[in-house]
Image (cartoon, rainbow, N blue to C red):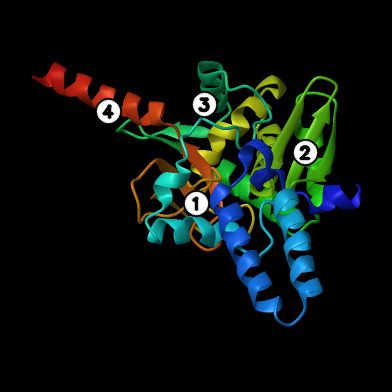
Amino acid sequence: MSLLDAIRRPDYTGERRCWPCTVVNAALLLAAAIVFWPLSTTVALLTVVGGGTLVYLRGYVVPGTPEFAPRLVARLGLSHLFEYAPGEEEVRQSGELGDDDGEQVLFALFEAGVLREDEDGALYLSEDFWSAWEAEMASLRDRDDETVAAAVAEAAPFDAEGGVEYDGITVDGERNSIWLSRAHAVADAAAVRAMAAFDVPESTRAAATAPLRMFLESCPLCGGPTEEETTVLDCCGGTMGVYDNPEDEVLVCADCGETLYVFEEEESDAGAGADADTDADAA
């Protein structure tokens, strides 16, 4: 990896550029240059040129900018200048090891004793499977990124090599390339191992990993408890919190804040439709 590759942050540059981050950092650099100018024009120019280069390559130079810049422009009433429309730009999102073939995956998980259904029709993990999955996650949680990458590559449904890139795990095969957050990498590799112990068909294991994330009771990263909350998208495609208009229902770690699962809007719509049908039948 070259020095430029180490400096670059693709999550906040190019088509994914976080403009509040860029503008806020540019303003801070300009302010710093103005302060330094009477003392040393050389230092002032180096501040502008060096800082500007970092902003171009990384999207920001001040640590923590992606966390505070969107909030800052929102509090200043300038959010309308940096509107983010979901789906308008490509954002780096954690991928999936396999395609989710809904009915087939669901049937296989029920057959293997991974999933159960309560009297109200709600799905939940069997205690035995959750214990096995949690144990596998615990065994990977404190391992280095390279070890986690190797575990995910082994779990992939194709010949693959694992790598570490963009603060996450990459799985590269001849025709497939997947990027996973470390949390998803740990959860998915552990899930495949646990499913193997439950004799879930090998052809189904990878496809089942993404749906299983919604049942996580503890965080793959830190082991903290999980909770559902409402978030809003920020300019970088991440989340800003609950102080603005809700956009997504997500499963997050209550301790470290890691997003573990995003509940799709279609899932909510389907649930509402089912309730409406039930009410209509009752009437």
Quarter residue 263 falls in? top left
- Whether residues under marks 3 and 2 lie with C-beta atoms below 8 angstroms apart, the answer is no
Residue at screen point 55% across, 36% down: 212
Give the residue pinned by disc 3: 110
Give the residue pinned by disc 2: 170
Quadrant where the image shows the C terminus? top left
In the image, is 255 to the left or to the right of 95? left
Q: Is residue 127 above or below residue 199?
A: below
Give the residue pinned by disc 1: 252
Judged from the image, the secondary structure of the residue bearing numbered disc 3 is helix
CA separation in Å, label 3 and label 2: 30 Å
Measured as percent of width and height from the top left, residue 173 is found at: 83, 26
Front residue of 58/272: it is 58
CA separation in Å, label 4 and label 1: 23 Å
Disc nearer the start of the sequence (2/1): 2
What amino acid is found at the position of numbered circle 2 in the picture?
Thr
Judged from the image, the secondary structure of the residue bearing numbered disc 2 is strand
Q: Is residue 272 above or below residue 217?
A: above
Q: Is residue 277 above or below residue 181?
A: above
Give the residue pinned by disc 4: 272
Res 179 label = none
